[in-house]
Structures are given as C-alpha cells and as structure tokens.
C-alpha cells in the first residue's frame, strides 16, 4: 500500500485534493459529499465500494440522508499514503460536480 506520507511530500499531495482535510485526532483525511437524497447518496457509496474493491483499499464512511463522509487512511502504514490520495482523486471524479 505504500509508505506513510510525511513532510513536504504530504503537504504537496494534500494540496492537490479539493475539499479534503486532515482528521485532527488521527493520521487520516476526510471529505463530506452532499446529495439530493438518500438514494443518490447510496448510489454514490455503491460506486465507491466497487472502486475501493478494485484498489483493495477500503474507506471508512458514514452516511445520513443526503450526506456521505469518507475517511481514508492506510492501516498497514498507520497513516495517509499515496494510495489514499490516489483513491481520493478517483472518488472526487465520481462525485457530484458541486463537491469536486
């Protein structure tokens, strides 16, 4: 899954992500996506699940009605890796335009 991103390399990688922020109490990144309703949010989660399965890298997530929060971190590296950043980019490509 790669090495944990640290220092300037981490800052550069995170600056490339729109709307993603670092989780304060652990080494992870998060983003919240907004949808018209629960069905649209669930459909997005299904797409992300298939993407995650192909990447063999799984998100932690929460949803409530039209909102989906995704948290990415590599358990083996115990922090954010380039794999997380790459997955975040791919998730954003599937997201509603207003959340890209």
Image (tube, grey):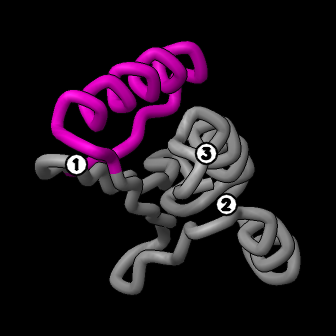
Q: Which residue is mark 3?
A: 92
Identified at 78% across, 79% down, the residue is: 11
Residue 78 vs residue 60, the one in the foreground: 60
Front disc: 1 or 2: 1
Q: Position of residue 83 (x, y in %)?
A: 68, 42
Q: Quadrant of the C terminus?
A: bottom right
Q: Who comes first in sequence, dot 1 or dot 3?
A: 1
Q: Which residue is mark 2?
A: 4
Q: Position of residue 34 (x, y in %)?
A: 35, 54
Q: Who comes first in sequence, dot 1 or dot 2?
A: 2
Q: Which residue is mark 1?
A: 66
Above or below, 49 against 3 in this view is above
Identified at 38% across, 52% down, the residue is: 70
Q: Who comes first in sequence, dot 2 or dot 3?
A: 2
Mark 3: secondary structure: helix
Horizontal side of 39 relative to 28 (left or right) equals left
Question: Which stretch appears magenta?
Answer: 35-62
Mark 1: secondary structure: loop
């Amino acid at each position: 899954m790669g090495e944990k991103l640290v220092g300037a390399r981490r800052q550069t990688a995170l600056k490339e992500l729109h709307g993603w922020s670092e989780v304060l109490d652990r080494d992870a990144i998060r983003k919240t996506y907004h949808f018209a309703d629960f069905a649209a949010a669930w459909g997005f989660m299904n797409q992300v699940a298939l993407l995650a399965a192909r990447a063999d890298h799984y998100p932690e997530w929460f949803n409530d009605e039209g909102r989906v929060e995704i948290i990415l971190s590599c358990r083996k590296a115990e922090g954010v890796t380039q794999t997380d950043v790459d997955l975040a980019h791919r998730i954003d490509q599937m997201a509603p335009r207003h959340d890209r």
